[in-house]
Image (cartoon, rainbow, N blue to C red):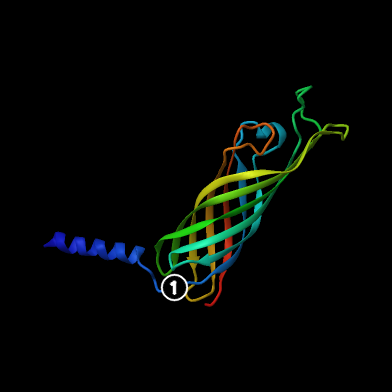
Amino acid sequence: MKLKYIVILLLSLVLNLFGQNGEKKSGYISIHAGAYTILSYNYNKYYDSKYGTIFGASLGIPLSSKIRLFSKISYFENNGIPTSDVTGLKEGTSILKQVLINGGMQFKIANSKVVNLYLQTGLTLAIIDEERKNKKGNFTYEIEGNGNLGIFIGSILEIKFGNSPFSITGEFNYIYSWSPLLEYDETYNAVSFVTGIRYYFGR
């Protein structure tokens, strides 16, 4: 008898967790900022740190109460002092500018009155401008608009405020490109963790 009540309780919890909570199927716009890390063995040879700040905005369009199409654009920049290929010393300057354009789908896998949890995946386009100069100020490397397609996968934790059209999000993404975007790598991959504010239309 006790087992029956335990099963009913567990089913109730699961249905409450994964069931729809009556939200409107509304689109959103958002802004975000946080940390971006390029996972490259050689990256520290050219830049002082693998870590930098990324910021941007996104737009979500609902297909249902659980699935959304979304697009996001972000900007990342990093500066450093590269190691000279000739002397092996740190000298000169280097700068990396990167625009990331993501597009894909978000899937709501859990929700409550306060918290939503999403998984997301899709395609990413990374557009990179990179330049390095020696200590005399002469270019040793320069490329503009280098980029190609990759894929990303990530998760989002959203905190809601009752019936308010605003919410706060924490988002983690892993990005992988099978072709190199940087001169000294065979592939390109990175991770980001950002926090943001969403505004939902029609609430």
Decide: is 36 above or below 7: above
The one of 27 and 173 positioned closer to us in this rendering: 27
Q: Position of residue 155 (x, y in %)?
A: 48, 53
What quarter of the picture does the N terminus occupy? bottom left
Report whether 71 appears left or right of 114. Answer: right
The one of 35 and 21 positioned closer to us in this rendering: 21
Q: Amino acid at mark 1?
A: Glu
> To which residue does mark 1 refer?
23
Quarter where residue 179 is shown: top right
Q: Secondary structure at mark 1?
A: loop
Q: How many marks?
A: 1
Residue shown at the point (85%, 32%) measured from the top left: 135
Quarter where residue 95 is shown: top right
Quarter where residue 32 is shown: bottom right
Q: Position of residue 14 (x, y in %)?
A: 30, 62
Q: Residues within 10 Å of mark 1 (few under 14, many from 20)?
A: few
